[in-house]
Image: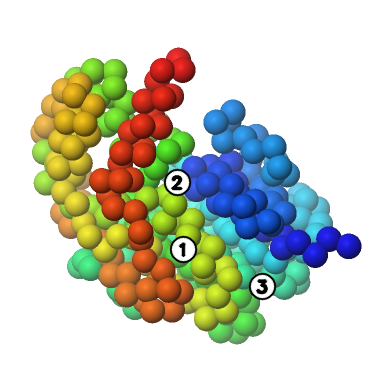
Amino acid sequence: MNNKIKILIIGGTGFIGYHLAKRSLKEGWDVVSISTRRPKKLRYISKVKYIICDITKKNILKKKINKNFDFVVNLGGYVDHSDKKKTYESHYLGLKNLTSIFLKKHPKSFLQIGSGGEYGKSKSPHKEIFKGKPLSVYYKAKLLSSLHLIKLFKARKFPSIILRLYQAYGPRQDLNRFIPIIINSCIKNKKFPCSEGKQFRDFVFIDDVIEAIIKSLKNKKARGEIFNIGSGKPIKIKNIIKYINKKIKKGHPLYGKVKLRKDESIKVFPTITKAKKIINWKPKTSFETGLKKTINFYYEQAKSY
């Protein structure tokens, strides 16, 4: 009889999903991933069982999830947020489909990856008690998902955990994200447009994000709670661009060519005291160390093309 812990990762082929699957295997767990497509070569792991399914299709989803899991982590949802209907359905209705299935399957922990964007324009540092007014359909869907999960915990003791994530970064992130764009533009010695870089954002390295997920899943005290996951130390965007530019010694940032959105906050960062206190988590990777590892990864990638 197999007594191994079983984890289901919704969105296991994405950036965070890949790293979580790797770590889960190191923990000695059985890993199953559900996503709408097979993983790219860069994110394929032979020991992971991949199931192709759209979480908005409830009846098909029910058939695909035909066994019990100890842990469920929801990283699913449409990544192109330009289609508002698909964004809303995949992030909120998809989550509701999952909870309706798992209410009957009784996992030990059901962890939802939320976002710091759920706080809207609330003044930083964000605390978990803040009631946010999200500025986009994506963030609104994330907030509705959080509220739904907390409601289920209170009414049915469903083991909901919500991690509100800030700017995760690291190796194998999608190339259209901020840090990979800057790194690759510099490696290719390109001129690239950017804002004046006056904004401050909170970045957290992928290994620290995964550690927060693992610690939350294993901790009974995490159930029914929302945790901010970031560094708690905002960094000026211009300083990041300058640092990468200096390290790579190539590339030409064109500051001021990208205008800030009207509703864009200048400073966005959380307080992470609650995560420190309840799940005994704090980020261990300095931004400099995390960036070096990330730059090295994309350097190696560039060589292989």
Q: Position of residue 154 (x, y in %)?
A: 56, 84
- The relative height of residue 222 versus residue 302 in the rendered view (above or below) is below
Which residue corresponds to the image point at 62% horizontal and 52% vertical from the top-left?
26
Residue at label 2? 84
The numbered mark at residue 108 is 3
- Callout 3, which amino acid? Lys
Residue at label 1? 212
Residue in the foreground of this view, choosing between 290 and 109: 290
- Callout 1, which amino acid? Ala
Answer with left or right where residue 214 lies relative to residue 71.
left
- Label 2 crowd bin: few (<14), some (14–19), many (20+), radius 10 Å: few
- Colouring of the image: rainbow
Residue in the foreground of this view, choosing between 109 and 45: 45
Q: Sequence order check: which comes first, mark 3 or mark 1? A: 3
Q: CA distance from mark 1 to mark 2?
A: 30 Å
Which residue corresponds to the image point at 49% horizontal and 56% vertical from the top-left?
210
Q: Position of residue 23 (x, y in %)?
A: 57, 52
- The relative height of residue 276 versus residue 86 in the rendered view (above or below) is below
Residue in the foreground of this view, choosing between 191 and 36: 191
| Residue 189, quarter of picture | top left
- The relative height of residue 209 versus residue 152 in the rendered view (above or below) is above
Residue furthest toward the right?
1
Residue furthest toward the top?
305
Q: Could you tell me if the residues under marks 3 and 1 are in contact, i.e. CB atoms within 8 Å?
A: no
- Callout 2, which amino acid? Lys
The numbered mark at residue 221 is none
Q: Position of residue 83 (x, y in %)?
A: 46, 41
Answer with left or right where residue 179 lies relative to residue 57.
left
